[in-house]
Amino acid sequence: MSRRIGDVILEVDDLHTYCFTSYGVVKAVDGVSFSLRQGETLGIVGESGSGKTMTALSLLRLAPRPTARIVKGSIRLGGEELLTKSEREMRAIRGRRISMILQDPQTSLNPVFTIGNQLIEAIKIHHPDGHRSLVRRAIDGLKQVRVAAPERRVADYPHQISGGMKQRVVGAIAISCEPRVLIADEPTTSLDVTIQAQYLRLLREIQQATNLGLIFITHDFGIVAKMCDRVMVMYAGRAVETGSVRDIFNRPSHPYTQALLNSVPSMDDDIARLYSIAGQPPTLWDLPEGCRFAPRCPHADDRCRHEYPRAFSVGEGHTADCWRLEKEWTPRPFSASTG
Amino acid sequence: MQRFIAKRALQSLLAIWVMSLIVFTLVRVTGNPLDVMLPLEAGPEDYARVSKHWGLDQPVYVQYAIFLGKAVQGDFGNSWKWHGHSAMGLVWQRLPATLQLAGFALLVSVVIALPVGVLSAVMKGTVWDTVAKVIALLGQSLPAFWLGIVLMWIFAVNLGWFPTSGRGGIQYMILPAITLGWFQVAAIMRLVRSSMLEVLDSEFVKLSRIKGLAEWKVVWKHCLRNAAIAPLTFFAIIAGVLMTGSVVTESVFSWPGTGLLVVDAVRARDFQVVQAVVIVFAGIFILTNLLVDILYAYLDPRIRYQ
C-alpha cells in the first residue's frame, strides 16, 4: 500500500453543536475532540442520533440553520481556525479543501440537471475556466471514479443511471477540487453489498492516489475493520472511545463499545438470539446528568449517574470515557474532554 | 415529443367536442329564448314565425348537427341580441380586452407570488413568512365580487387614485387585475412555498452547499427549478380560473371583455354568443394545458423520456 500517513490536517477540539428547538436545546454534538492526519482514515461509529452526521456537517459549518449552532469549540483545518471564518471564506473552503459524500445517492443529485452540469458546477466554483476545458475536467473526474463511457454520461440525467453509478458521480463531485479532507457519511448504506465493496475499494484507491484524510461515518463494524486506521465511537453527542482499529477491536474499553461489538453477529457462533443493548439511547434534549450511557450500562454506579467521566488513557492513542478505567489507568494529564 | 404533442392535440379536439355538447344542452335547458326576445303581446304565430326563422322548430339533434357542421367551419351563427353581428365576431372583438386583463393579472400575480413564495420558504418562521401567509389567506378567502367593490370604493371612489370602471390606460387595469389576480397570488405563493420547503430540505441542496456554491445560487438555481414543477401544473388551472374570474371581475368593473359579453348574452338567452364564448374559453383552457404539459416536460427531464 502506497498510502502514507502524514501531518495532522484537521484538528477538532471540544466541539459543541446544539440545536435550539421548541422541545429545548438538543445537544447533538457535546464536546467532541479528534484529529485527522493526511492519508489517514478515521471511522466515526455510533447508532443513529449519536451526533455523527451533525459532527460532519459542523466541520463544513453546514449544520442546518437556524436551528443548529456551533456554540463552542475549535476546528482547525491545516492550522487555520474555521469557526471564525466568514461565510464567504467558508465557501472557498467547502469543496476545495474539505468535502463530503452524502448518505443517499438517489437524492444527492439534482434531478433536473445533467450530471455533467452538476460536476462542472462544482469545478467551476473553485476553478473558473472555459466551458470546453471544464467539460474535459468533468470527464476526467468521471474517469477517476471508474464511470464507463464518461463522454456520454456527462449528458445523462440522474434518473438515467443506477444508484451505484450515482454515488460514484457524487464521489466525483466531492473530490473534483482535490480536497485534503473528505467526509463520507455512510456512503454505502443504501447500496447493495457487491456495489458497496466496489465503492469502498474505489474510495481507498482515491485516498491512495491523493493522500487525503478520510473521515468515514458508519455504523457497520465490518466496514470499519476494512477501511479505517482509527475509530471514534460516539454516543449521545460525545466521543466515548477513541483508538486504533486494532485497539478498539481487541481491547474495547468503554462498556458501550463492548456492547456494540457484542451486537455484531459472528459467523462462528451458533447463537439463537442476537445480542442487543438493553434500553434506548437517551433523548438529546433531556440527557442524564452523569455518564450518558449509565442508564443502559451494566457496570454503572452512583458516581457514573452523577458525574461525567473524564477520558482515561487505555494505551497509546487509545482513550475511553469511563470511570471504571480510573483504577486501572492513570488519566491523561492534558485530557480536555470534560465539560 | 412529436407523438406526445399529436396525441395531446387529438385529446384536445375530443375535449372541445364534448364541451360543445354540454354547452349546447345547457343553454337550451335555461328556457325558451323567444320568451326574452319577443315582446309580451306576441302571439303563437309570432313564436312560430321567429322559431322557424332561427331554426328552433327543428328537433334538438338536428339543431345540434347544423350547429356542429357550421362550428367546425368557425361559424357560430348570428347573435340574436346584437343584430347584424356574428357570434364569433363579437367574441373576437371582445377577447383582446379579456386577454389583456387576464394576462396582466397573471403577470402581476407571478411576479409577486414567485419571489414572495421563495423568500417565505427560505425565511420560514420569521415575521416575513407570517405576513406572506396572511396575504395568502386573505387572497384565498376574499370573494372577487366583494373584493372588487371594496377596492373600487376605497381606491376609486374615496381616494380617487384610479378610475372606477371602463377600459383605457394602465390605470384602468390596476384594480381589476388585483381583483382577478389576488386569488392566484395566494395560490401560487402557497404552492411555491411548500414545494420550496421540501426541496430546500433535500440532499442535493446539501451537496450543492458542500460544493461551496453561494446560497443565492442554491436557492434560485437548484431549488427553484425543482420547486417550480408543482406550481407549473397549477398554471393550467389558473388559466381556467382567470377565464371564469373575468366574468365576475369584468361585470364589477364594466370591463368590456368576453366575460361581460357572456353575462349579457346569458341574460338575453343569446345561445349563439354563449356557445361561442364557452367554446373559445374551452379552447384557450385546453391550449394552455397543452403548453403547460410541454413546458413541464422541458423543466423535468424525468418526464421527457417516459
Image (spheres, helix red, strand yellow):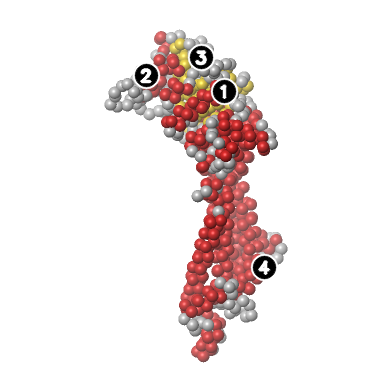
Q: How crowded is mark 3: few (under 14 residues within 10 Å), some or many (20 or more)?
A: few
Q: Looking at the image, which residue sits at the far left?
A: A272
Which of the pair A197/A96 is nearer the observer? A197
- Subunit of label 4: B
Where residue A36 sits, quadrant-wise, is top right
Q: Quadrant of the N terminus of chain B?
A: bottom right
The percent position of residue B86, horizontal first and vertical second, equals: 62, 76
The percent position of residue A233, horizontal first and vertical second, equals: 45, 22
Q: Which amino acid does label 4 sit on?
A: Gly
Quickly name the residue at label 4. B166
Quickly name the residue at label 2. A300
Vertical placement of A144 versus B184: above or below? Answer: above
Examine the rendering and report whether any part of residue B303 can be seen. Answer: yes
* Disc nearest the viewer among 4 and 1: 1
- Subunit of label 1: A
Label 1 element class? helix
Which of the pair B237/B5 is nearer the observer? B5
Q: Looking at the image, which residue sits at the far front?
A: A149
Q: Do labels 3 and 1 share a chain?
A: yes
Label 4 element class? loop
Q: Which mark is residue A335?
A: 3
Vertical placement of B1 versus B24: above or below? Answer: above
* Numbered-mark total: 4
Q: Are marks 4 and 2 on the same chain?
A: no
Q: Which amino acid does label 1 sit on?
A: Ala
**Could you tell me which residue is drawn at 65 percent across and 66 percent down?**
B96
Q: Do labels 2 and 3 share a chain?
A: yes
| CA gap, disc 2 and disc 3 | 22 Å
Label 2 element class? loop
* Disc nearest the viewer among 3 and 1: 1
